Amino acid sequence: RMQLAIQIWAFLEDPDLFGYGRCYLNIMVGAIVLSAMLPIMQTTEVPLLDPVTYGIFEILLESIFTVEVVLRLCSTPSFRTFFVNAYNIVDIAAVVVPLCVKISAGFFLDVKQAEANLDYLVMTFITMMPVVRMLKLLRRFDTSHLIMKAINEALAALPVLLYNLTVLVLFFSSLLYLAESRDDIPSLATAVWCCVVTVGTVGYGDVVPKSTPGTLTIASLIVLSALYMAIPIGIVGYAFQSVWERRDQLLLIHRTFTRFQASGYTVRDIPGIFLAFDTNNDGVLSLNEFTEMMCHLEIAFDKKRITDVFQTFDENNDGVLDDKEFVKAMFPWAFAEMYGDLTEESDESGADGESETIQE
């Protein structure tokens, strides 16, 4: 690729590596927040801007977003991975959807007139675009990956907890339905709603028990649900704490993984890539060889970050890195498939050695 394209890609993916990168980030964050707030302010009783001024602001902001998307597309190392990247999909949607709406309804949208005419196309655009545009900020928050990882770790325990909670709600709903008159609780569904609100500690007050047995039923549910809800909250809290304690390592792996995929490489390419950059043919990469590989493949450009990645992946701290360590850290789900036979052979040879030692 052209050197200019490489520099543009590096700047857009990691602006902090450049002296003016922080300024670019601040401008983009400000533009995104402004683009999300303007449609909301146009729905107030007295709109913030007249339709023409609002339309001019929209065109200006969308032009900024369009330039960014075009630059990313023109400088991407892989067009295939570009169009399946979630961040890029959000960026494209934030540009294409407003353009389609304005071609259909006009470039200067009058929100009040759209509400009066029940123009659902414009109304949907006004209500949903703040959400889409705020999603553009996800690219700027690496730590959002940590939250998703904590949720994934906690999901294994949640199904049985939700099942037990459902049984608890249904049981107390049945008791409440039997305890109350049909004037107060007309159906079992109403009793379920009352118990769900109680368990969630929301307490709307739209449905309340009137009889003494019904009151005792709800009082018992309040105590039990308070004790029970501490379990899933504790599990999620512990999962997040565990992830947060490893945040530096996880963020390094996630950034490297994202850059690796964005460059169009797959896990099957790793052994060949390591072999190509193993200049002394010793089967492993030194820090200098690993640095050359990361820079040449446009996965990372900052030498300090490359060193941190190298030390994170080097599990046995021997100062070198092989393809197995790299795959295990970045693609743990593919490690067994690629190196399972080698691992089994290693285990068998180790077991044979132990048996020979015992026989001696």
Image: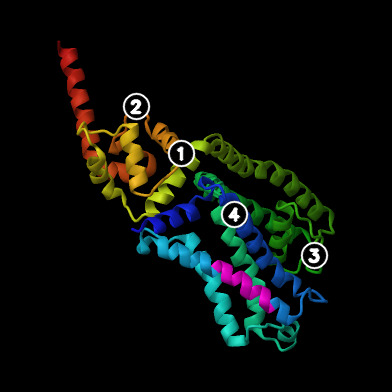
Residue 73 showing in the rendered view: yes
Where is residue 190, by image quadrant? Answer: bottom right
Q: Is residue 28 within the magenta segment?
A: no
x, y (%) of residue 186? Answer: 75, 69
Tag 4 residue: 25
Magenta highlight range = 55-65
Mark 4 and mark 2 in contact? Answer it, CB < 8 Å: no
Tell me which corner region of the image, top left, top right, bottom left or bottom right, holds residue 232: top right
- For disc 1, the marked residue is 305
Name the kind of residue labelled 3 in the image. Answer: Ser
Find disc 2 in the rendering and name its residue.
319
The residue type indicated by label 4 comes to Leu
Task: Mark 2 or mark 3: name the one nearer the start of the chain.
Answer: 3
Identify the residue at the far bottom of this view.
117
Q: CA distance from mark 4 to mark 2?
A: 36 Å
Residue type pointed to by label 1? Arg
In the rendered view, would you say 14 is above or below 191? above
Q: Nearer the viewer, mark 2 or mark 3?
A: 2
Q: Position of residue 337 (x, y in %)?
A: 27, 45
Would you name the residue on which mark 3 appears?
A: 181
Q: Identify the residue at image location x=61%, y=53%.
A: 23
Circle 1 SS class: helix
Which image quadrant: the C terminus? top left
Q: Amino acid at mark 2?
A: Gly
